[in-house]
Image: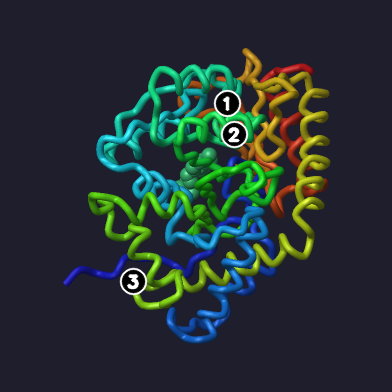
């Protein structure tokens, strides 16, 4: 018999979350998470599922029937997209301009795809001419791009141009909208995106665990016409369709509390209005960006491609990012993050997402950062 570990009741610290995610959760979302569980096939839960799907359609700006929350974090909705769309032998075009293009590559390869690349430096978006050239050379079946690259703070413009290049070649487009959904302009139907996925813990300000995914009929036809089974049973859309489609039959037990949370987070999006929400992110993050520049810090990307939900700034030469982040956390209970992948040690990543996108948080980040930078001898 093992002894029980000597632990106390849980009491996590209270942090101000201004990193690349999770963002702070709205009190209404936290409250609904303590509501009693009901069964995942209870008629009352089925009504909640319908509402979540409708609210997701609004937030993605799509009429896609196949619009669901995938059980798991953003990587689960991402893997559902790649694992279902990509069949063994398909050619998959992925970007090299950030960390999450690399994750697309890994998922596409595991699904049996032959991966080819369209290049752009970290810190720049894809150029439609380069995408067109990559299509001429490789004629891919599936093209993935990252709408809001959390590792670089770059927002991909010209999405409609990218999708029309892909569709001229009869390819399917998968868009990573993890750091854009509910925070920056995204119009899935108008921009002709075939598959878009996201996560809860960024601009929706929901705890991670139920992750938005939408597919148009054309993409779902490809999935349902596959010659081979999807490698993951858990994420196989042809099986998940039984639960989220007309039948409402058991596949796996939905993460009920996470679905409540997402329902309330999406309700808050609907109450605020999507366009107002995009505007709030632009305005509040605009103040953050202006304040960072006043501190003498340089943004990692051009203003043209600025991503309000994730502000990436270059770390001044004299500053140690590890020490800086530790001071912000220990002294101010404030979370921001350092760089990922190729930009590790080069940038700081400051999120401005969902419920965290508030003026008081921006003022707090700027004053704490100014103090922590000064403690390392940095002068603006
Ligand atoms: C652009 C992007 N894609 C995918 C993911 C993966 O999401 P998760 O960490 O929730 O699995 C993230 C998470 O930060 C992300 O920023």
Residue farthest to the left, as pictured: 1
**x then y, percent, for residue 152:** 58, 28
Image position of 257 (left or right of 160): left
Q: How packed is label 2: few (under 14 Cα within 10 Å), some, or many (20 or more)?
A: some
**Nearer mark to the viewer, of 2 and 3:** 3
Given this view, does label 3 or label 1 mark the residue nearer the observer? 3
Q: x and y percent of residue 117 in the render?
A: 41, 22
Q: Residues within 10 Å of mark 1 (few under 14, many from 20)?
A: many
Q: Secondary structure at mark 2?
A: helix
Quadrant assignment for the C terminus: top right
| Residue 233, picture quadrant | bottom left
Give 72 or 2, whichever is nearer the viewer: 72
CB contact under 8 Å: marks 3 and 1: no
The answer to whether residue 193 shows anywhere in this view is yes
Contact, CB < 8 Å: mark 2 with mark 3? Answer: no
In the rendered image, which residue does mark 3 sit on?
251
Q: Quadrant of the N terminus?
A: bottom left
CA distance separating discs 1 and 2: 6 Å
Q: Among all residues in the image, which is located at the extreme bottom? A: 43
Q: Which residue is mark 2?
A: 325
Q: Residue at x 36, y 50 (%)?
A: 84
Q: Residue at x 44, y 29 (%)?
A: 94
Q: Is residue 30 above or below residue 205?
A: below
Kindly state the secondary structure of the residue where label 3 is placed.
loop
- The x and y percentages for residue 316 are 66, 16
Using residue 233 as the reference point, say whether residue 365 is left or right of it: right
Contact flag, marks 1 and 2 (Cβ < 8 Å): yes
- Horizontal side of 109 relative to 287 (left or right) equals left
Q: Position of residue 276 (x, y in %)?
A: 81, 52
343 vs 288: above or below: above
**Residue drawn at x 45%, y 49% as measured from the top left:** 219
Residue under pointer 1: 321
């Amino acid at each position: 018999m093992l002894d029980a570990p000597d632990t106390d009741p849980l009491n996590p610290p209270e942090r101000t979350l201004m990193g690349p995610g999770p963002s702070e959760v709205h009190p209404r979302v936290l409250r609904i998470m303590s509501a009693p569980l009901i069964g995942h096939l209870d008629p009352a839960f089925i009504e909640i599922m319908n509402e979540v799907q409708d609210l997701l359609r609004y937030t993605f700006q799509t009429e896609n029937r196949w619009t669901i929350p995938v059980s798991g974090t953003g990587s689960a909705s991402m893997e559902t997209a790649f694992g279902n769309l990509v069949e063994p032998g398909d050619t998959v075009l992925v970007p090299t301009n950030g960390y999450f293009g690399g994750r697309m590559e890994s998922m596409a390869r595991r699904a049996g795809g032959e991966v080819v690349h369209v290049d752009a430096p970290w810190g720049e978006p894809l150029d439609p001419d380069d995408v067109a050239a990559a299509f001429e050379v490789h004629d891919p079946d599936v093209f993935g791009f990252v709408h809001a690259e959390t590792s670089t703070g770059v927002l991909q413009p010209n999405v409609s141009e990218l999708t029309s290049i892909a569709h001229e070649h009869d390819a399917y487009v998968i868009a990573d909208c993890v750091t854009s959904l509910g925070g920056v302009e995204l119009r899935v139907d108008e921009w002709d995106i075939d598959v878009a996925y996201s996560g809860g813990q960024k601009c929706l300000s929901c705890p991670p665990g139920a992750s938005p995914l939408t597919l148009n009929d054309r993409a779902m036809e490809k999935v349902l016409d596959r010659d081979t089974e999807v490698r993951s049973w858990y994420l196989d859309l042809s099986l998940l369709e039984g639960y989220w489609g007309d039948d409402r039959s058991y596949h796996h037990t939905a993460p009920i509390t996470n679905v409540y949370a997402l329902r309330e987070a999406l309700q808050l999006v609907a109450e605020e209005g999507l366009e107002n929400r995009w505007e709030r992110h632009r305005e509040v993050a605009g103040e953050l960006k202006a304040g960072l520049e006043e501190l003498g810090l340089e943004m990692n990307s051009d203003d043209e491609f600025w991503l309000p939900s994730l502000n990436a700034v270059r770390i001044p030469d004299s500053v140690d990012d590890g020490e800086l982040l530790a001071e912000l956390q220990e002294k101010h209970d404030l979370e921001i993050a350092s760089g990922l992948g190729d930009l590790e040690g080069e940038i700081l990543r400051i999120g401005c997402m969902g419920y965290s996108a508030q003026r008081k948080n921006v003022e707090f980040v700027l004053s704490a950062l100014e103090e922590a930078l000064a403690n390392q001898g940095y002068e603006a």
